Image (spheres, rainbow, N blue to C red):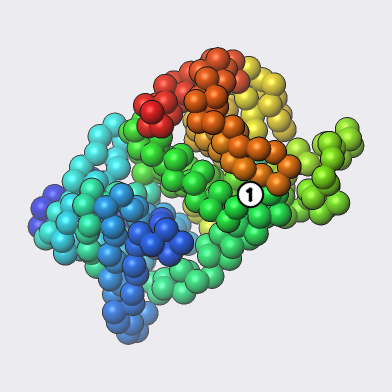
């Protein structure tokens, strides 16, 4: 299957979703019309913003199409990327494929679907995002911590030429990495002193709690991201948690989020710790390349951050 200018390509998709929320002011979404279950949604993506779609085996008859009005977008495909410009379109009535588009310049397109989707923008995804922001604030970070982790992780993922499925997994895994902390008692989460052994054991469970929360949603891209959430504290040498996975037992997306989360923790001012300088954090990351952190991920991370 390929995307070609002014030709019809068949894909299987569930629904479109702006991967950059209103919080980043990078995407604008408006419902143009809705009739008999068919919706036409107008998307404006600022340069660098992303948009994605997930397959849905439960809605096999859904017809969906993306029609590019202006700008230039990269379509992330396995081992290659292709580009979409004004007049190009993708359309499909189900196969199964994840799609992620990155705007290489300010771009506009229409998304047309026979399965009403607009409500998704203000329900499940937004609710989980809000929950994630709340928990980061309780954990001593500012509200934009999750978005910083997500953005930096995606830049690393794009640099590594990950395909659309992997980028979707990375996006939601990064954004919701600590969602499981909602299940950790506040007496532990907010404790102003070092955690004792029992408390630390409970705290480490936030990885498993988070994965369970996402799997229970029954939504394709959250189920996909659950593995990232579960593994984001695993470390390359097996010293992480919850399972002590090593090397390639840890999925690549979790290795990216784990590194980016560590870097952000080192360089963020938090309630109980001062921010370290970027240089000091990078020195430590370079020293731990191939020990705590996946060597290839460190190399791509450094090429993005430096
Ligand atoms: Fe975490």
Q: Nearer the viewer, residue 174 or 46?
A: 46
Which residue in the protein does label 1 denote?
141
Report the number of numbered marks: 1
Vertical position of residue 45 compared to residue 162: above or below: below
**Residue at figure coordinates x 22%, y 63% from the top left:** 108
In the rendered image, is residue 34 in sight?
yes
In the picture, which quadrant includes the N terminus?
A: top left
- x and y percent of residue 233 in the render? 65, 33
- x and y percent of residue 78 in the render? 31, 36
The secondary element bearing badge 1 is classed as loop
Q: Seen in the image, is 298 located left or right of residue 88?
A: right
In the rendered image, is residue 7 in sight?
no
| The quarter of the displayed image where residue 123 is located | bottom right
Q: Nearer the viewer, residue 292 or 39?
A: 292
**Residue at figure coordinates x 24%, y 67% from the top left:** 110
Q: Seen in the image, is 204 located left or right of residue 49?
A: right
**Residue at figure coordinates x 24%, y 39% from the top left:** 81
- x and y percent of residue 255 in the render? 53, 30
């Amino acid at each position: 299957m390929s995307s070609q200018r002014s030709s019809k390509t068949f894909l299987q998709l569930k629904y479109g979703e702006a991967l950059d929320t209103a919080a980043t002011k990078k995407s604008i979404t408006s419902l143009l019309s809705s009739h008999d279950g068919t919706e036409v949604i107008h998307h404006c993506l600022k340069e660098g913003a992303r948009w994605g779609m997930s397959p849905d085996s439960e809605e096999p008859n859904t017809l969906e199409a993306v029609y590019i009005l202006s700008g230039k977008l990269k379509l992330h495909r396995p081992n290659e990327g292709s580009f979409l410009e004004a007049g190009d379109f993708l359309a499909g009535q189900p196969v199964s494929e994840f799609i992620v588009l990155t705007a290489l310049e300010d771009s506009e397109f229409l998304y047309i679907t026979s399965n009403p989707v607009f409500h998704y923008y203000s329900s499940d995804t937004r609710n989980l995002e809000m929950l994630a922001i709340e928990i980061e604030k309780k954990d001593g970070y500012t509200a934009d911590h999750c978005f910083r982790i997500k953005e930096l992780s995606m830049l690393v993922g794009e640099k590594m030429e990950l395909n659309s499925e992997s980028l979707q997994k990375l996006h939601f895994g990064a954004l919701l990495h600590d969602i499981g902390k909602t299940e950790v008692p506040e007496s532990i989460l907010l404790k102003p002193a070092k955690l004792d052994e029992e408390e630390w054991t409970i705290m480490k469970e936030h990885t498993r709690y988070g994965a369970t929360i996402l799997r229970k949603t029954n939504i394709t891209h959250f189920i996909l991201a659950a593995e990232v959430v579960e593994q984001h504290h695993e470390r390359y040498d097996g010293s992480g948690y919850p399972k002590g996975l090593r090397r390639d037992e840890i999925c690549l997306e979790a290795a990216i989020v784990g590194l980016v989360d560590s870097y952000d923790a080192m360089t963020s001012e938090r309630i109980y710790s001062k921010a370290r300088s970027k240089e000091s954090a990078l020195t430590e990351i370079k020293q731990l390349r191939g020990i705590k952190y996946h060597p290839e991920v460190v190399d791509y991370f450094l090429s993005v951050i430096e």
